[in-house]
Amino acid sequence: SRAALFDAENKVKITFKDVAGLEEAKEEIQEIVEFLKNPTKFTILGGKIPKGALLVGPPGTGKTLLAKAVAGEADVPFFSLSGSDFVEMFVGVGAARVRDLFKQAKAKAPCIIFIDEIDAIGRSRSRGQMPGGNDERENTLNSLLVEMDGFATDSGVIILAATNRPDILDSALLRPGRFDRQISIDKPDINGRTQIFGVHLGPLSLAEDIDARKLAAQTPGFAGAEIANVCNEAALIAARRNKKAIDMQDFNDAIDRVIGGLEKKNKIISPEE
Ligand code: ATP
């Protein structure tokens, strides 16, 4: 169905306050919020507003969340699709989907287009190709490049894309006038994790001994997505134990469970045929 081609949210409720830590990234991306809110202020002296920025960082660190928050802060619609949806697509479908996305976005400008996992579409065209393989991905990438070049910088559409593999991206995507800005989103340090726990503990019923900083100290290497996961697991574990409030024992078990899940995921490096 047409509705399933990509996601469109007209009213985004997420703002910067929902994104914990990432202070530098927020500061850099604030510029894009201003471009969306007040484009003529920037173009008056002949300057061109950038078309897009690339959010670079490991999985689960809040790239999607931050892109959404830009839309929420600027109060503009948010269109999104994931590069992985384009893998194994029928001939012509990927390119058509990209064209359709840009057409609808332009009609709703100012707005944000967010492309998650852009490396699935945008990996370098020269990289390890099998004869006859990857043609469709290449068509999709070409249509993305054509669309990016085809709209005026004052059209009010800004494209944010996310990847954890900037090194494999086709250099055509990184050329001036395309994704010529990169914003790096790193895994949180202990202060970042404390702030992320702060956000996700907020809505929970907690025992008195629960403290964001203590939890942050126990979760080195965790990204925001894993911290959100720990908080949710702890709430479910405590509920199963018929507790009135989530205590440290529940959090310890939740942390073990999330670490277990991560270890399992890392083991599946090359699935057996
Ligand atoms: P991926 O690369 O896997 O798509 P991502 O970097 O886009 O991941 P998100 O999808 O934004 O990560 O994060 C997943 C969830 O983790 C968010 O919806 C949120 O609940 C939580 N989260 C991640 N980072 C943060 C953060 N900085 N502050 C608050 N919550 C966060």
Image (cartoon, rainbow, N blue to C red):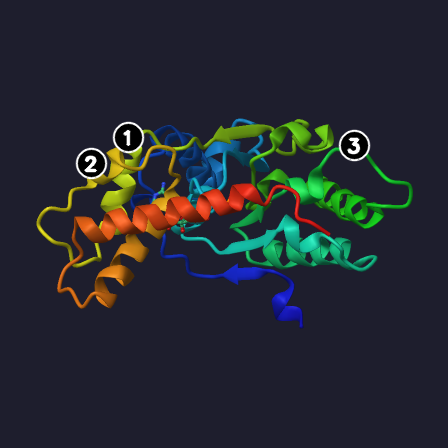
Residue at horizontal 18 percent and vertical 68 percent from the top: 242
Check disc 2 and give the amino acid type.
Arg
Query: Which of the 4 image quadrants contains residue 121?
Result: top right
Dot 2 or dot 1, earlier in sequence: 1
Confirm or reject: label 2 Cβ below 8 Å from ligand 1: no
Q: Secondary structure at mark 2?
A: helix
Query: In the image, 54: left or right of 213?
Result: right
Q: Are marks 2 and 1 in contact (CB under 8 Å)?
A: yes
Residue at screen point 58% across, 31% down = 48
Label 2 sits on residue = 213
Residue 230 placement (x, y as % from top left) = 32, 50
Asked whether the viewer can see residue 160, the reply is: no
Quick one: 143 or 90, which is closer to the camera? 90
Determine which of the numbered discs, if any, sits on residue 127 in the image: 3
Image location of residue 114, percent across then percent down: 55, 48
Label 2 crowd bin: few (<14), some (14–19), many (20+), radius 10 Å: some
Picture layout, residue 98 above or below residue 144: below
Disc 3 crowd rating (10 Å Cα; few below 14, some 14-19, many 20+) is: few
Q: Secondary structure at mark 3?
A: loop
Which amino acid type is marked by label 1? Answer: Ile
Name the residue at 36% across, 57% down: 13
Q: Nearer the viewer, residue 199 or 39?
A: 199
Kindly identify the residue that appears in the image at 84 percent across and 47 percent down. 135
Mark 1 residue element? helix
Which residue carries the number 1 mark?
A: 190
The alpha-carbon separation of the residues under discs 2 and 1 comes to: 8 Å
Q: The residue under label 3 is which amino acid type?
A: Arg
| Residue 124 pos. (x, y %) | 75, 33
Q: Residue furthest right?
A: 131
Asked if labels 2 and 3 touch by Cβ distance under 8 angstroms, the answer is: no
262 sits to left or right of 4: left
